[in-house]
Image: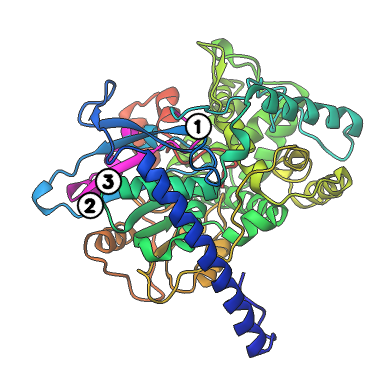
Amino acid sequence: MRPARDVGVWMVLLKRAAWVAVLSVLLGLLGAAGAQARAKAAASIPWAACADAEGYECASVEFPRDYKRPNGRTVSIAVVRQPAKDQANRLGSLFVNPGGPGGSGVDFVKGSPGLFASLNERYDIVGFDPRGTGSSTSAIDCEANQFTEGVYSQPYATPDTDRAEYLQRVRTYTQKCVRNNPGILPYTTTASVARDLDGLRALVGDEKLNYLGFSYGTFLGATYLSLFPDRIGRTVLDGPIDADEYINDPMSNLAEQTAAFERALQRFFMACAADQEACLGFGGDDPHLAYDALIRAADAAPVPAGDAGPAVTGQDMLNATIITLYAKQNWPLLAQALATAQAGDGTLMRLLTDATYGYDRETGRFDPGTDRYFAIGAAEQRYPTDPATYFRACRRSWGSFDHFWFNAGYVELNWGLFPVQGRPVYRGPFDVPASAQTPLVVDTTYDPATPYRGGVRLAKDLGNARLLTMDGDGHTAYNGNSACIDEAVEAYFEAGTLPAEGTRCRQEVPFAQEAAKQRAAGASAAERIKRLRPHQKPRVP
């Protein structure tokens, strides 16, 4: 965080000089550790054709588990590459991260070819599974039933919840996470992943890192920019997090996120009232009132879901709502889920709820993404340890947020009681020197997961950064929301051209048009749920 404006200029200079001195020592140590790591690793990445994806190359690379002990135990990092189509005019590698923490960059690249179609002309698209995730070694899995044991397990806590009972539920989950993931939890910090990323950059032969990060991937990007300012290539941070607040004041960060989800729901209600045809008639001229009535009724008498699974409660519906708010393209899906639930059919709500929890009813297994999101963040974010703090926060959340109170407050007790401390943790400052390549920060005005003002603060903290705004809804902006955004991002990656300062682009995703397309295509609800963007995970910043 930058010094306050009223601090004397000499004090500011002294503080900055001290930071420069500390950072210089740190970078020297990192450089030595990185050199040893690269010496220990192969001279280049041993690419081979992926067995499960034609046109992609896969590999794994060893890095130190603990960079303070570069000759000690290692972790294996899974990587994937989609070679540039125009090899004669190749610009290098473009590393991507889908968010999380805990998202699989390997799955992201393999599963999102359309997202990178333009960038893949002249860049190798490279994804990787950060340590503790995906196909990398020691991938975190708490082996918990997310419905009853995970951080978002039900029933959601309120000020009337028995505190001792809730404390026990939290301790059971955190202890299960520690017991089932030995040897990896302290070493999954963002600072360590940034060092892995720098090692991968060196192994592909790039002098500078070209990087596209979404959501939490912007925190990873901001960390890399701060640790390796002399190796910054073309960097885009889309769906940006206030890096300083995320790592140092996460309770404020999550309260802002919860307010943003409430705002996003109100935006949906406004659009629904304005276009009842697109909203399938749900709620008439007051969808907000109809929504609240539906939630109350479902809590009193859950709505049957047929063969899809158990009947759906009002709390299930609140949870299902969150996943659809991550993209405006999902609003027709939410409208359909609400309309059918109001008519007595909870099938679609059940499918959305299961997707939110990562549950596959055919296999009976939970995707461990929520466990990874929790364990990685809990090991490095600066959370207080006194339970009373969370009981007070719960009352504030309950009093402030009509629908999504469960996203902040009590739930954070899981983070506060997590007994593992990550090492090392980088807490700032997050800034980019004027001599470095200027990163592009792409921010959306009504983003529910990473609120707009957080991205504005990140751009200000970085100093040498250009802010590009999309006036619109949903989490992240690049690819398919605005031709103006897409053109600006692609011009930056292709030629290093930044948009003019203050550039704003309008989103081009009409509610009515998208609803008509979905219905005309006859896409099933289950298929549309599968198409939710990989980096649009519930409550993941």
* Badge 2 or badge 3: first in the primary sequence: 2
Residue at 85% across / 47% down in the picture?
Answer: 395
Asked if the magenta segment contains residue 122, the reply would be yes
Label 1 element class:
helix
Q: Is residue 403 left or right of residue 518?
A: right
Q: Are marks 2 and 3 in contact (CB under 8 Å)?
A: yes
**Residue that numbered label 1 is attached to:** 336
Outermost front residue: 71
Real-space Cα separation, disc 2 to disc 3, in angstroms: 9 Å
In the figure, 355 relative to 411: above or below? above
Q: Earlier in the sequence, mark 3 or mark 1?
A: 3
Quarter of the N terminus within the rendering: bottom right
> Residue 273, position in %: x, y?
55, 48
Q: How is the image coloured?
A: rainbow
Residue drawn at x 61%, y 54% is 260
Tell me where the magenta segment starts and ends, as one range. 110-134
**What amino acid type is highlighted by mark number 2?**
Gly
Q: Residues within 10 Å of mark 1 (few under 14, many from 20)?
A: many
Left or right placement of residue 400 versus residue 244 in this view: right
Crowding at mark 3 (Cα within 10 Å: few <14, some 14-19, many 20+): some
Relative to the observer, which residue lies in front, 127 or 362? 127
Residue type, numbered disc 3:
Val
Which residue is the site of mark 2?
92
In this rendering, position of residue 149 left or right of residue 337: right
- Residue appearing at x 64%, y 43% in the figure: 422
**Could you say which disc has been placed on residue 204 in the image?**
3
